[in-house]
Image (cartoon, rainbow, N blue to C red):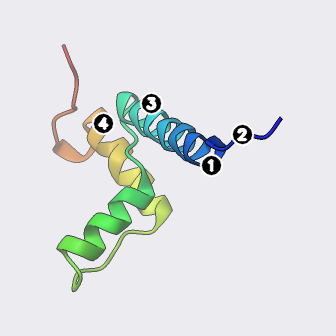
């Protein structure tokens, strides 16, 4: 069977999967590193970008309130 619309459908499913992964990471306090890098490149091109490990540790510290910052909690 030949599918004329498989290309766009595959792209939509891939995009949906990407958004679901991003949403799941945000729910547990871990934003996507690639989105962070793209944002830094667009909005702050002259400033340094954290490594993946630095990014993870920074987001973890923000999530759990380490280093004197308040934790991002719902209750």
Mark with earlier residue (2, 4): 2
Q: Residue at x 43, y 38 (%)?
A: 19
Side (left or right) of 52 relative to 62: right
Q: Residue at x 22, y 32 (%)?
A: 71
Classify residue 65 by image quadrant: top left
Would you name the residue on which mark 4 appears?
63
Distance from disc 1 to disc 2, alpha carbons, whole Å, reads: 9 Å
Above/below status of 64 relative to 47: above
Would you name the residue on which mark 3 appears?
24
Q: Residue at x 57, y 39 (%)?
A: 9
Between 64 and 49, the one lying in front of the other is 49
Distance from disc 2 to disc 3, alpha carbons, whole Å, reads: 32 Å
Would you name the residue on which mark 1 appears?
7
* Element under disc 2: loop
Classify residue 48 by image quadrant: bottom left
**How busy is the neighbourhood of tag 3: few (under 14 within 10 Å), some, or many (20 plus)?**
some
Side (left or right) of 4 relative to 41: right
Mark with earlier residue (4, 3): 3
Observer-side mark, 2 or 4, equals: 2
Distance from disc 4 to disc 3, alpha carbons, whole Å, reads: 15 Å
**How busy is the neighbourhood of tag 1: few (under 14 within 10 Å), some, or many (20 plus)?**
few
Outermost residue toward the top in this view: 75
Would you name the residue on which mark 2 appears?
3
Quadrant location of the C terminus?
Answer: top left
Side (left or right) of 58 relative to 72: right
Distance from disc 1 to disc 3, alpha carbons, whole Å, reads: 26 Å
Distance from disc 2 to disc 4, alpha carbons, whole Å, reads: 46 Å
- Mark 2 near mark 3, Cβ–Cβ under 8 Å? no
* Element under disc 4: helix
Distance from disc 1 to disc 4, alpha carbons, whole Å, reads: 39 Å
């Amino acid at each position: 069977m030949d599918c004329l619309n498989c290309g766009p459908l595959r792209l939509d499913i891939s995009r949906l999967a990407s958004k679901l992964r991003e949403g799941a990471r945000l729910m547990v306090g871990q934003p996507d590193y690639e989105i962070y890098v793209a944002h830094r490149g667009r909005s702050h091109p002259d400033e340094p970008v954290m490594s993946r490990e630095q990014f993870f540790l920074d987001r973890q510290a923000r999530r759990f309130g380490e280093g004197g910052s308040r934790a991002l909690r719902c209750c």
